[in-house]
Amino acid sequence: MCKKMMQGLSVIIFFVWHIQLIAEPMNLAIARKHVEDYYDSGQYTLEMNKIIDRAISYFSSCCSMDVRKPAIVFDIDDTVVSSYQRSKEIGFGFIDSLYRSWVAQAELPLISETKRLYDHLVACHYHIIFISARPWYEKDVTIRNLKHKGFTVFDKIILRTPEMMHMTVKSYKSLMRKRLVMQGYTILASIGDQWSDLCGGYAEHLIKLPNPMYIIV
Ligand SMILES: [Mg+2]
């Protein structure tokens, strides 16, 4: 009887031990290495180019689209300028005060694939609008960074005002798109590296760019 109980107990212990092995999350050092490999191996560029090629092809056929104030909305961070190298230096993660210091330098490098799409859209005379979750007081450095990287043509750059700082990014960006539609724009596409840049309506197409570094809701 006792032997049978011990055998049963062994099975249970093995089962629990096995479940624990399965449940253990990926080691952080390995996860970081995966992210670095994704960017440094060229896989990120490959995936970006696929997405951008598809978008350029679609918007080429829409060049003469007869809609009122056809607009494309771009996010900024890790959509048109990249924080990858800076994030890699700190082992990834998001530290708000540090990120604000990077923004203040106005030197984040451009993402050349997105710039290719932007150039195409500008040539086709689409209205370009940037909506970012950056705070209002970073407007000057944001414009300086964008212009320095060649994003010189746009209708608006919209940043969060003090009363919008408590909102989720998804709610804030959705509200901003709604206001643009009320101003007469037809938002043909919204482009961003986060689903919170895209969800919430008021855009006909959603273009999600890869970003394995962090998630913003
Ligand atoms: Mg972003």
Image (spheres, rainbow, N blue to C red):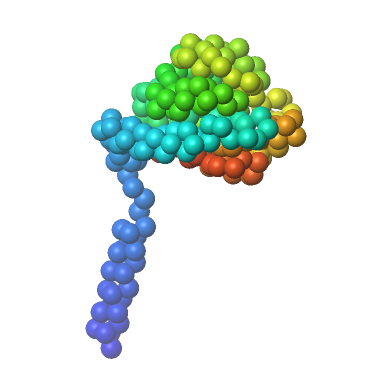
Tell which of 93 and 164 is nearer to you: 164
Tell which of 149 and 36 is nearer to you: 149
| Image quadrant containing the C terminus | top right
As displayed, is residue 67 above or below residue 83? Answer: below
Q: Position of residue 176 (x, y in %)?
A: 68, 33
Tell which of 183 and 45 is nearer to you: 183
Name which residue lies at 66% across and 29% down. Answer: 69
Quarter of the figure with residue 37: top left
From where the camera sits, is residue 195 visible? yes
As displayed, is residue 31 above or below residue 135? Answer: below
Left/right placement of residue 19 relative to residue 185 reads left
Left/right placement of residue 180 relative to residue 101 reads right
Q: Position of residue 121 (x, y in %)?
A: 51, 26
Left/right placement of residue 212 relative to residue 10 reads right
As displayed, is residue 207 above or below residue 124? Answer: below
Quarter of the figure with residue 196: top right
From where the camera sits, is residue 167 visible? no
Name which residue lies at 36% across and 34% down. Answer: 49
| Image quadrant containing the N terminus | bottom left
Name which residue lies at 72% across and 32% down. Answer: 184
Total marks placed: 0
Quarter of the figure with residue 156: top right
Name which residue lies at 50% across and 22% down. Answer: 123
As displayed, is residue 205 above or below residue 12? Answer: above
Left/right placement of residue 75 relative to residue 90 reads right
